[in-house]
């Protein structure tokens, strides 16, 4: 099990007086739906963070969507005003963010001013579970607190995944 030290994402939430609960799991688990099961939450409440490349943007953007959905690239491109967008390969996502896939967190990247797009389903939730910025650690907080802190733009970006 990963060490349970305080992460920068936790410090950020505390500095902004945002309540959260940390949940830990075996860091070898990489699939978002398995992470949801490991931390004991519904897959629709546990959000994964993807790095998306938009050709006309200065840098890639982050897209957060429920772990039980898949990214709809066409709908996301339309929401971003782009003709086309692409999901960054894992190696590029890690190089661009400085974080490991499975531990990419919009909270951990806040100081780097990434644009963050959040699937609309989050607005209907009281709480949301997201990566803490390291594999093996998730944070549960109020969805509205996350939206306000990060200035998330709500988009219709996900399709229900096959069971």
Image (spheres, grey):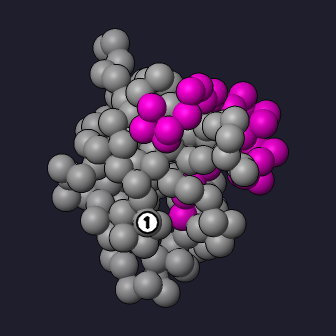
Residue at 31% of width from left, 22% of height from top?
Answer: 160
Find the residue positioned furthest to the top.
Answer: 162
Residue under label 1: 151
Q: Is residue 59 left or right of residue 7?
A: right
Q: Quadrant of the C terminus?
A: top left
Task: Please report the bounds of the magenta region as a residue range.
Answer: 78-107
Between 145 and 141, the one nearer to me in the picture: 145
Q: In this view, does 41 lie above or below 72?
A: below
Q: Count numbered badges in the picture.
A: 1
Q: Which of 127 and 85 is in front in this view?
A: 85
Q: In this view of the protein, can residue 8 be seen by the observer?
A: yes
Place of residue 156 in the rendered image (x, y in percent of width and height, measured from the top left): 33, 36
Q: Assess whether residue 100 is covered by the magenta stretch.
A: yes
- Can residue 48 be seen here? The reply is no
Residue 62 against residue 52 in the figure, above or below: below
**47 over 90 or under it: above or below:** below
Q: Is residue 110 above or below residue 17?
A: above
Residue drawn 54% across the image and 64% down it:
107
x, y percent for residue 10: 51, 73
């Amino acid at each position: 099990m990963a060490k349970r030290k305080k992460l920068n994402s936790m410090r950020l939430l505390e500095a902004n007086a945002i309540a959260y609960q940390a949940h830990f799991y075996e860091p070898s688990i990489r699939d978002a739906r398995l992470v949801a099961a490991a931390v004991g939450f519904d897959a629709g409440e546990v959000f994964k963070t993807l790095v998306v490349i938009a050709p006309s943007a200065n840098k890639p953007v982050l897209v957060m969507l429920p772990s039980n959905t898949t990214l709809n690239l066409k709908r996301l491109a339309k929401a971003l005003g782009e003709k086309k967008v692409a999901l960054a390969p894992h190696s590029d996502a890690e190089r661009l963010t400085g974080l490991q896939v499975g531990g990419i967190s919009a909270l951990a990247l806040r100081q780097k001013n990434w644009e963050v797009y959040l699937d609309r389903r989050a607005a209907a939730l009281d709480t949301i579970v997201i990566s803490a910025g390291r594999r093996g650690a998730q944070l549960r907080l109020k969805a509205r607190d996350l939206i306000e802190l990060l200035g998330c733009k709500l988009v219709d970006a996900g399709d229900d995944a096959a069971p």
